[in-house]
């Protein structure tokens, strides 16, 4: 792979800190920020920003917000 122009983002937390894991036939993305492991990855920076915002919001405000719980 010579095309290293595109940055990949974690679909779970929006972090660009992801790496392609392939120890043999295993081909998945791993996120070092949240521990996500899967074949799906985000390549759109704008979407990643939204995911990240949402992720940070969820994880920074742990407390009295149980009214609006949406398990995706
Ligand atoms: Zn992540």
Image (cartoon, grey):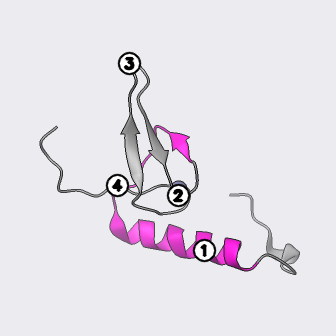
Residue mark closest to the camera, 2 vs 1: 2
Dot 3 corresponds to which residue?
Answer: 24
Q: Identify the residue shown where x is 79% and y is 75%.
A: 62
Q: Which mark is residue 8?
A: 4
Which structural element holds mark 3? loop
Which structural element holds mark 1? helix
Magenta stretch bounds = 36-61
Residue mark closest to the camera, 2 vs 4: 2
Q: Main secondary structure of the magenta part?
A: helix
Is 57 contained in the magenta span?
yes
Q: CA distance from mark 2 to mark 4?
A: 13 Å
Which structural element holds mark 4? loop
Is 51 contained in the magenta span?
yes
Dot 2 corresponds to which residue?
Answer: 33
Q: Earlier in the sequence, mark 2 or mark 4?
A: 4
The quarter of the picture where residue 9 lies is: bottom left
Q: CA distance from mark 2 to mark 1?
A: 12 Å
Q: Earlier in the sequence, mark 2 or mark 1?
A: 2
Residue 1, how many percent across, how many down? 17, 37
Dot 1 corresponds to which residue?
Answer: 56
């Amino acid at each position: 792979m010579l095309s290293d122009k595109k940055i990949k983002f974690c679909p779970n937390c929006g972090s660009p800190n992801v790496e392609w894991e392939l120890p043999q036939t295993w081909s998945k993305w791993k996120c070092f920020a949240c521990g996500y492991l899967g074949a799906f990855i985000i390549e759109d920076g704008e979407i990643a920003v939204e995911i990240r915002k949402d992720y940070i919001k969820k994880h920074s405000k742990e407390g009295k917000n149980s009214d609006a719980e949406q398990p995706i």
